[in-house]
Image (cartoon, rainbow, N blue to C red):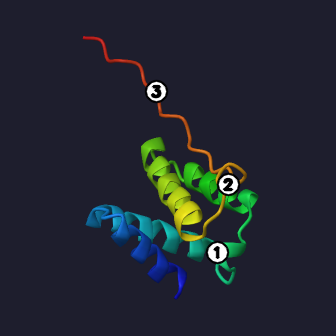
Amino acid sequence: MDYFEKLNCDMTIRNMAEGTKTQYQSTISDLAKFYSGKDLAMLTEDEVQRYIYWQTQMNFASSYVCSKVSALRFFFEKTLKRDLRRFIIPCPKKDKSLPVLL
């Protein structure tokens, strides 16, 4: 069973929404493209953080990047059975903006 099939199976067992499944699969597909030719199970913490850094440098909103981080955490913890206490995947802080005064 390949990673995408196992990921889909794990999400179906947890009765995740179709939109969430699509977003998580898209994130893992993007990660696989970012590290083309590498086995996703062999990615190091630094490599995953480099992918997150690349996402933040693309000027995506922090909430969008956090949704990508959620997908990565699910994939590495549930699908690949990694211990996330030792494999840290950080989430960027929420963008802060000042209120508009009339």
| Vertical position of residue 61 compared to residue 25: above or below | above
Q: How many labels, in total? A: 3
Task: Kindly identify which residue carries mark 3.
Answer: 96
**Sequence-first tag of 1 and 2:** 1
SS type, badge 2: helix
Q: Residues within 10 Å of mark 3 (few under 14, many from 20)?
A: few
- How far apart marks 1 and 2 lie (CA) works out to 13 Å
| Vertical position of residue 57 compared to residue 93: above or below | below
**Sequence-first tag of 3 and 1:** 1
Place of residue 29 in the rendered image (x, y in percent of width and height, measured from the top left): 50, 74
- How far apart marks 3 and 1 lie (CA) works out to 33 Å
Place of residue 45 in the rendered image (x, y in percent of width and height, measured from the top left): 72, 58
User: Which amino acid, by three-letter code, is at mark 3?
Assistant: Lys
The furthest residue to the front: 13
User: Which amino acid, by three-letter code, is at mark 2?
Assistant: Gln
User: Which amino acid, by three-letter code, is at mark 1?
Assistant: Leu
**Sequence-first tag of 2 and 3:** 2
Residue at 43 percent of width and 24 percent of height: 97
Q: Residues within 10 Å of mark 1 (few under 14, many from 20)?
A: some
User: Closest to the observer: 19 or 77?
Assistant: 77
Place of residue 57 in the rendered image (x, y in percent of width and height, measured from the top left): 59, 50
Task: Kindly identify which residue carries mark 1.
Answer: 40
User: Closest to the observer: 4 or 62?
Assistant: 4
- How far apart marks 2 and 3 lie (CA) works out to 22 Å
The furthest residue to the bottom: 1
The image's mark for residue 49 is: 2
User: Closest to the observer: 74 or 64?
Assistant: 74
